[in-house]
Amino acid sequence: MSARAEPILVVGGGIGGLAAALALGRRGWNVRVLEEAEEFGAIGYGIQLGPNVFPMFERLGVAEAMLRQAIVPPALVMLDALDGSQLARVPTGDSFRRRFGHPYIVLHRVDLHHVLLDACKALPNIALEPSSSAAKFEDFGDGVRVHTKEGRSIDGAAVIGADGLGSRIRAQLFDEGAPRFIGYVAHRTIVPMARAPQGVLREEVVLWAGPGYHIVHYPLRRGTLFNIVAVFRTPTYAEKANAQAHRAELERTYRSARPEMKALLSLMDLERRWAISDRDPIRHWHRGRAVLLGDAAHPTLQSLAQGACMAIEDAVCLAGLIDAADGDFAAAFRNYETARLARTARVQLESRTLWEFYHAEDIARDVRAETVASWSEDHMFRCLAWLYDGFALPGGHDRP
Ligand SMILES: Cc1cc2nc3c(=O)[nH]c(=O)nc-3n(C[C@H](O)[C@H](O)[C@H](O)COP(=O)(O)OP(=O)(O)OC[C@H]3O[C@@H](n4cnc5c(N)ncnc54)[C@H](O)[C@@H]3O)c2cc1C
């Protein structure tokens, strides 16, 4: 049997899993994507994607479809939450496009997911299998078997764990316990643009940076929708509560914030919250015929808005190396780790530093203002170049 006949099993049909399936499928591999949810889909909020993701979208054949769904904001703006002053403004218009060769975009996660899903559905060699929750896998040396909670056993040539922060595949490979919760939570909301408060920028990606809290907002879907994310530190991050309790907590936490921020908070749906966490970088993401990608491999804080971008870069890189190794999965997985480790670890570690910067208090807040005051456009572009200039796929394996 040829190496490609036996399917590769992708556990998790999120952004990284679908990108991996598409990248492998386009190269002629048979793929089965096992997703625990009853339907393939995304939680319905916004997402920002840096220009580094575009060369990957081009290889996946979805760049134009993504752009049709996206908004290209004029700038990323950082405002001080206490006095409303502008701390930094990274222009993302013409000069950004000239410098990085691709745009910075924001789009609805549902739209991003649909583009990837439609592209997968168009390939007969990709099987999308909802209601398939991986419980464990066996590695026989020359193949794998995934057992699902629903009682099915599925055989394949190798398994890719793209099952996110709480990855079952990672838990079986490395027994490390829970992710590192940092004591912050996020609430997310989308409202019609007509409800966006007066005095708030509507076209830009805006981050209001406050002591122990921040708010991010930006437009979606041709400017008809307004996406708001409120993030703050709280000792109750691990507790379940109701919207009323959350509202009281927000009012206490954001009492020093600008009135525009309070107006934004009044729009928030507070039913659901996400506890923010990451993990320390690790050197190895594979054992035998099992490998990890995306949040399963290197979960990161959201400060650089790059978790999904890294998952997509992983997917394209891994598929190229699997294809080149033609059946030697151990070699492919080793080369993939080597290619991806430093870049993804840098995203994890710099995101932690940036997290402190966003939430600076007291004297640290003064230092932040002093630091950013001298930042020119050129300086900011140079600081972002390691990330936005993109990822060079390992030599020889970067054909589309
Ligand atoms: C508040 C917030 C804002 C963010 N903003 C950005 C941003 O602007 N830009 C950006 O690039 N990133 C952002 N991120 C990060 C980004 O969402 C993640 O990095 C990205 O979704 C990771 O993709 P993934 O495919 O690895 O994992 P996920 O998207 O988590 O997908 C995992 C999938 O696996 C499925 N699954 C889980 N367990 C199993 C199992 N046992 N069996 C089968 N299926 C399973 C899940 O149902 C899910 O579909 C943000 C994250 C948060 C929390």
Image (cartoon, helix red, strand yellow):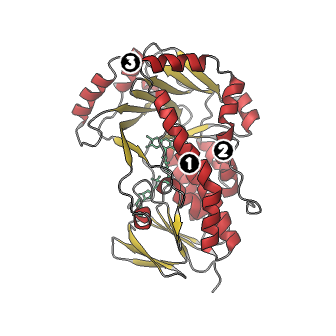
Of residues 284 and 396, the one nearer the viewer is 284
Identity, as a three-letter code, of the amino acid under mark 3: Ala
Whole-angstrom CA distance, mark 1 to mark 2, is 16 Å
At 48% from the left edge and 40% from the top edge, which residue is drawn? 302
**Percent x, y of residue 321:** 67, 66
The correct choice, above or below, for 199 with respect to 282 in the image is above
**Percent x, y of residue 275:** 35, 42
Q: Is residue 330 left or right of residue 83?
A: right
Secondary element at tag 1: helix
Identity, as a three-letter code, of the amino acid under mark 2: Asn
**Percent x, y of residue 292:** 51, 62
Location of mark 2 (residue): 52
Q: Residue furthest bottom?
A: 1
Report whether residue 237 is seen.
yes
Q: Is residue 227 left or right of residue 321?
A: left
The mark closer to the camera, 1 or 2, is: 1
**Quadrant placement of the N terminus:** bottom right
**Quarter assignment of residue 188:** top left
Identity, as a three-letter code, of the amino acid under mark 1: Ala
**Percent x, y of residue 161:** 48, 64
Q: Which mark is residue 345?
A: 1
Whole-angstrom CA distance, mark 1 to mark 3, is 33 Å
The mark closer to the camera, 1 or 3, is: 1
Q: Name the N-terminal-most of marks 2 and 3.
A: 2
Location of mark 3 (residue): 257
